[in-house]
Image (cartoon, rainbow, N blue to C red):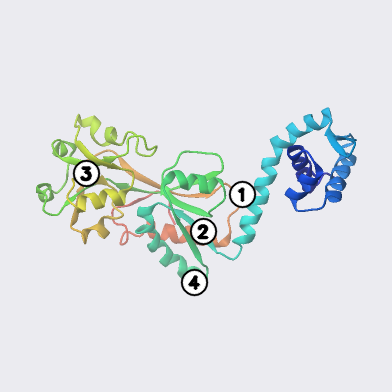
Amino acid sequence: MIRFRQIEAFRCLMSCGTTVAAARRMHITQPAISRLIADLEEDLGFRLFNRTKGRMEPTTAAIRFQRAVEENFLGLERLRQVADTIRAEENEGLSIACMPVLSTSLLPLILKEFFKLRPDVPVKIDTVGNAEVMVKLQDLKVDVALSLTIPAIAGIEVEPLLEAPALCAMPADHPLAARSEITPQDLANETVIGWMPNYPLSQNQEDKYFGHAGVYPQYTIRTHTSHTRYAMVAHGFGVSIVEPFASELWQHQGVVTRPFVTDTCHSYVIAYPSSGSRSAILQDFRRATLRVVNDKALLPWATPLTQE
């Protein structure tokens, strides 16, 4: 039976050229390299190297076999990396990837419920943007993620969580603060804190909010994070279209919000690495999440998409 160590020795020898260099890279002895190669040749049933004058010259069969090894070795290496990660984090509890705005608003509410179910489970929070969320899920770096809707992609299982209305944020002394709601036409002559034009999750935001109304506001500052837009509003740089999660946090900084009249809403999901099963801890986190999402006292503006 071919063993991983044999394949590793073969790759090292092919790249290094000598058993001495290969042994040094693998931190084993030269005879051990030779033994691994000999065992591999016996298992394969054909010669990989010609031994001439103390050197090991790869055969044509070795060149052909190397192509297959390189195609498949990365998969084996990834399994080893995953195993190393699991072993290192075995006692680390629950690892969560979360957008910045959710980590300071929704996630604390969820963790209060979660710790009622699992008071002794340590939690690690990785605050990242949506693009990084997808990478961390695919690479099995986290157990679960909370984010804006992400596209269907291999290695990720997505469960719709809630929809949230769009709000218009403005300084408390802004003339539009007297309105009960804000329309796109109201912002025709306003300076708006906008979105990064080339950021994947911000593309077409302007069209979604203003294009149908034929309104094209002025943009002096653009960013892809909600907290930054709130902060720019708080410092008087303009108004902005925002999600409602952080609105209460920024009220204390002189920012008020009003409903923004649009057909566009913010959709959020809970996502997991694709798997046939989930741990009991992960199931309890999901249960805590749904309790919060479906609690009108906590999120009166939210439309839950999944029932507890």
Q: Quadrant of the N terminus?
A: top right
**Which residue, as the protein is rendered here, is positioned at the far front?**
53
Q: Which residue is mark 1?
A: 276
Sequence-wise first label, 2 or 1: 2
Q: Position of residue 98 (x, y in %)?
A: 43, 53
Residue that appears at 17% across and 43% down = 182
Q: Is residue 27 above or below residue 280?
A: above
Q: Which residue is mark 2?
A: 95
Q: Is residue 82 above or below residue 298?
A: above
Which residue is nearer to you in this view: 173 or 111?
A: 173
Sequence-wise first label, 4 or 3: 4
Which-is-in-front pick, marks 4 and 2?
2
**Rendered image: mark on residue 260:** 3
Residue that appears at 25% across and 51% down = 230
**Rendered image: mark on residue 119:** 4
Where, by quadrant of the figure, is residue 296 drawn?
bottom left
Q: Amino acid at mark 3?
A: Phe
Q: Amino acid at mark 1?
A: Gly
Sequence-wise first label, 3 or 2: 2
Sequence-wise first label, 4 or 1: 4
Real-space Cα distance between discs 3 and 1? 41 Å
**Secondary structure at numbered mark 4:** loop
